[in-house]
Image (cartoon, rainbow, N blue to C red):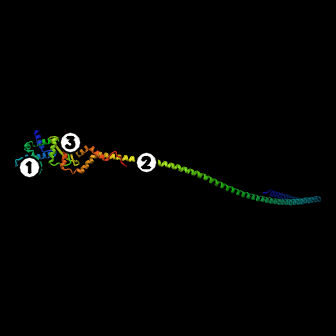
Amino acid sequence: MPITEAFIILFSAGNGLFFLVIIALSIKLLKTRRQLRRHTLTPNQELQVEESHRRADQIIHKAIKRAQQLLVKSELEGLNFLAQQKIESRKIEAEHRRNISSLLEEMSYKLTTGTEEAEKTYKKFLADLEEHLAADLSRKQTVLDGKIDTFFNETTVLLNSFVTELQKQTQVQIDKEIGNARNIIGEYRRQRLEIVDENVVSILEKTLNITLGKKLTLAEQTELVYEALEEAKKGNLFV
Amino acid sequence: MTETNQLLETILTNTYSTADLRNRLTLLREFLEDYFFTPHEHPNLIFLLNEFFVKKDESRDEFNALNAWGYGLYSQFTKENLYPALDSIEKSAADLPTVTLFLPFAPTPYETPRLGKWLRSNVDPRALMEVKIDISLIGGCAVSYKGIYRDYSLKYYLLRSKVAILKAIGDYVRPGVEIAV
């Protein structure tokens, strides 16, 4: 609540209270008059009472008048104060409006200026960044090209070395396999010859049996038996 | 026993194999039993022997063999000594040296005496031969005597020439030449 309005309310309340006091005194005075009229007064007393009543009325009248004057004055002052306050308020409001408008304009200007500045800065930043990135990219591309060349050169050397080594190993392996095959064949031949050696007599015997078995005449067979007996004799079988 | 030996010696003159000996001793026993214990009208022993073989349908070779033994052998037997004499002969025959011949063929009846005579001349004068057929033998024969067996067939000659045969085979194999792979 503004101070001016509080002051006006307080002032109006004081006037009201003053009126209430005046009214209360008037009512008291009327009651006193009635009580006095009930008593029998002397004429002098009545004159004194009348005088006192008249004076009291005058006082009351003056008090009421004074109170009304005070009331009017206070109301006027209050209204005046309020009017002044309103005027002041409007002035302040207008001043505020102007200030705010000025401030807004200034802020708008600053904002526009700042935005433009920021945009310029941002564009410059982007340009710088693009330039920097391009330079960096170019530099990295150069480095990468160099590394790729190095990599390919090293890879070529390694591959050549690997292929040569592989050829050597393959040749060694092939020689080894050929050696093994020769050994196996030699072993096979040896085993077959062993079998032939061990069974050559049986083989020949069967061969001769097939070829000669039924072609020997009885006389030839008999003659061979006598030769066998002679051999047995030479071998001391009959001793 | 001397008489028994003489009888056996007579039998062995034309008997060379154990099979012939067993067969002829059986025929001799049967004939003598027939001769001594069967009534017959003809007095000639050889005639009766021939009649016996005809009746039994035996081979003429066997008749000839028993006929060859002559009267001298048959006159040694009587009714009384018949069985003891025959048993003694069989017992003595069991002790004769025997040569077992494994032949790839069956010898003819005419070849058997030739083989027997060879054995009598070269092994023992009273030797007998026992012939067994072994068709797996090629050329020659195998001989078993006194528990020793030896093969003198073609296999024997091949074994004896094994080194030379292997050398001949080895020449074809050409050892020392690397085998191309």
Front in this rendered view, residue B37 or A69:
B37
Disc on res. A232: 3
Quarter of the image where one finds residue A6: bottom right
Image x and y of residue A203, in percent = 27, 48
- Looking at the rendered image, the quarter that the N terminus of chain A falls into is bottom right
Q: Is residue B180 above or below residue A32?
A: above
Where residue B179 sits: x, y (%)?
36, 48
Residue A109 at x, y = what percent? Answer: 74, 58
In three-dimensional space, the C-alpha distance between marks 2 and 1, rounded to whole angstroms, equals: 96 Å
Q: Earlier in the sequence, mark 3 or mark 2?
A: 2
**Residue A53 against residue B171 in the figure, above or below:** below
SS assignment at label 2: helix
| Cα gap from disc 3 to disc 1, whole angstroms | 41 Å
In space, the residues marked 3 and 2 are separated at their CA atoms by: 63 Å
In screen coordinates, is A185 left or right of B130? right
Q: Chain of mark 1?
A: B
Same subunit: marks 3 and 2: yes
Q: Secondary structure at mark 3?
A: helix
Q: In the image, what residue type sits under mark 2?
A: Gln
Q: Give the chain letter at badge 2.
A: A
Chain designation of label 3: A
Q: Residue B52: give x, y in percent of width and height.
A: 9, 49
Give the residue type that dot 3 points to: Ala
Q: Which mark is residue B50?
A: 1
Q: Between residues A66 and B13, which one lies in front from this camera angle?
A: B13
Q: Residues within 10 Å of mark 1 (few under 14, many from 20)?
A: some
Please indicate whether residue A117 sits to the left or right of residue B29 in the image: right
Both on one chain, marks 2 and 1? no
**Amino acid type of disc 1?**
Asn
Q: What residue did someone put label 2 on?
A: A171
Identify the residue shown where x is 11% and y is 38%.
B2
Does residue A207 appear anywhere in the picture?
yes
